Amino acid sequence: MNHLIILAGRSAWNRRGTLGLMLVAIMLSVALLLGVERLREDARDSFSHAVSGTDLVVGARSSSVQLMLYAVFRIGGASNNIRWDAYRMVADHPAVAWAVPLSLGDTHKGYPVMGTVPGYFEHFRFGEREALRLSQGRVFSGVFDAVVGSELAEQLGYKVGGRIVLNHGGGDSGLAEHADKPFGIVGILERTGTPVDRTVHISLEGLEAIHLDWQGGAPMPGLSIPAEFVRKFDLSPKEITAVLVGLKNRAAVFNVQRQINQHAAEPLMAVMPGIALGELWETLNTAERAMQAISAWVVAVGLCGLMAVMLAGLNERRRELAILRAAGARPLDVFTLLTLEGLGITLVGAMGGVVLMAGMAWLAGPLAQAEFGVVIRPRLLSVDELQSLAAILASGLAASLVPGWMAYRHSLADGLSPRS
Amino acid sequence: MPDSAPPAILIENLRFRWRKGDAACLDVPALELACGERVFLHGPSGSGKSTLIGLLSAVLRPDAGRVQVLGQDLGPLGGAARDRFRGDHIGLIFQQFNLVPYLSVLENVLLPCRFSQMRKQRALQSADSLAAAAMALLQHLDIDPSLHRRPACQLSVGQQQRVAAARALMGRPELIIADEPTSSLDEGRQMAFLELLMRECAGSGASLLFVSHDRRLMPRFDRSIDLMTVNRAASGAMTTGDA
């Protein structure tokens, strides 16, 4: 067997041009298959990681998935706002331990701006109930103070003491800037691997202040209120986007949820983050399965290509195989030789695919986090991935049996010298 | 010849045809090669030389009659046993394309020992290692040591044929069958190759069946056989196109 492995390797190396291309095709297809699966897992992990310890998210009535995506992940379109009274109602509920209001809509250079209260930094949890920590500076206290996430600070090179200008709405055009009221960075958060890293946190009062002289999404003509005068106005928030709620006792969650959903003064919705995520996964399930099926199909195409290349090369190898037979190789040896070649290429292709995927994850990881908020964790192969690789190898073996069998047949028919 | 040793080749009433319905290609009532004998088998194209070699090397099966090599009747052997028998006992040299192009000269000579345990053990009886045995053979056949590590495809045709002879002799098989081994060599080299082959066969005690159409080589052999007279199917009319 050993000598056949060596022989198969030497023979394959002799035809390295064609087989090398085939190897690349298999590597790419394996990297795609594993990459799709890994991206899916990482996306799920990132989403599940982004919020923990929050029992309910309260917002205007819409779909629970939309509310979660917008309020927690800062993805998708703005939902309707809810009135400050609604926040008071939730915060004053006897079962509620803490309630943190969030107000979203503005951006800074494409990064989301979120108005909140200092309590956010105290109560918000992510991952395994980890609290937010400042790597520099302090939590905001003044109207024009801002606390920025680690990734944003890193990408834009911000430090404590820097000044930033916010944009109105989601645009990055620079036309609708709150240029007259810049914010000063007072704190930078430690890295969390969640959307927090990309968020500018300011106080709800600050958010009110920059919109004092605005109406309907545009500066009011002829009216400009300088920053130093904003304190003379009522900066208490009128509307917010969502409320994060922690309960004194988790058992009360269904009760509180029902009461909020039935709130008469205003149509509200309370969603449990875990359940909303479950709905999200359900929605994505079909698409994920389609992606898996396509990538599995690509691997199958790769292995069919391998089979085709080996079969096409067989005719040119008849002389080589006849020489081996004259030197004492049995047809079974010839069969084994061809099968080993196909299996070997699949094996090397699969290993190359794993390396390629790891390399791509390493290269594309920062981009995926910046663009989609998905943290790609470098990690060893999981049991599922090993199973996928085993299935690929089994398919490679099956594909190699065909040229192996054909060579066996040729070998029997040709004897010691190929007849054309 | 000692009586105890069975003949290297013994053919009785052999009949063979390529396809049912075809006229017989071989019809050989009797043919014998004694142990250690060196025989020149000649005949024009179409006299059935290659077919006979196929039958003797257990690639083809006779339709009737008996083919016995080294006392072993090849008829009843199954596919795997025939392959094993060939690998263990017969060294083959063809007119050309004898070597695996991507293997080195040395690896080509070692090939039979990879597939046959028997030849591996016999090679080790006369040398410390397989490589040493192969190198000794190559040296006997005038292949310079500087060529041993070269890919076989880089050698000249004459060198390739001598390497092929070394491979056929490796592990001392009892029977060497050479099918037109000198046809691709120029005239001056033919005799030299033949001398080397004869000497090595004598050295290892192998019987030699040398098939050629070139009768000038004939006087060097113990005996010659004209296939046209031995093969009744060919002596009448040339019935097949097989060379």
Image: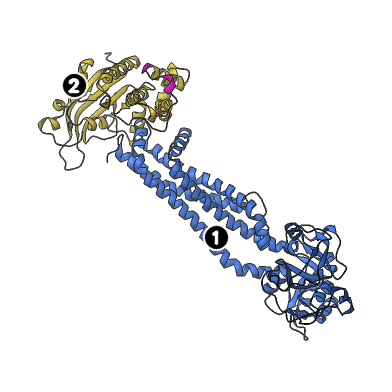
Chain colours: A blue, B yellow
The answer to which image quadrant residue A272 occupies is bottom right
Res. B116 visible in picture: no
Image coords of residue B68 (percent x, y): 26, 27
Residue furthest toward the right? A232
Which SS type dominates the magenta stretch? loop
Q: Is residue A116 left or right of residue B109?
A: right
Where does the magenta region start and end? Answer: B140-151
Image coords of residue A313 (percent x, y): 38, 44
Residue A194 lies, with reference to residue B165, above or below; the image says below
Alpha carbon separation for disc pair 1 and 2: 71 Å
Do the dots labelled 1 and 2 sit on one chain? no
Quadrant placement of the C terminus of chain A: top left
Q: Chain of mark 2?
A: B
Residue furthest toward the top? B2
Image coords of residue A11 (percent x, y): 43, 37
Q: Chain of mark 1?
A: A
A146 or A359, which lies in front?
A146
Res. A165 visible in picture: yes
Is disc 1 in contact with disc 2, using a CB cutoff of under 8 Å? no
The answer to which image quadrant residue B123 occupies is top left
Q: To which residue does mark 2 refer? A: B215
Q: To which residue does mark 1 refer? A: A292
Residue B88 lies, with reference to residue A192, above or below; the image says above
Residue furthest toward the bottom? A264
A325 or A187, which lies in front?
A187
The answer to which image quadrant residue A116 occupies is bottom right
Q: Is residue B23 left or right of residue A276?
A: left
Q: Nearer the viewer, mark 1 or mark 2?
A: 2
The amino acid at mark 2 is: Arg
Whether the magenta-drawn stretch holds residue B150 is answered as yes
Residue A42 lies, with reference to residue A344, above or below; the image says below
Residue furthest toward the front? A222
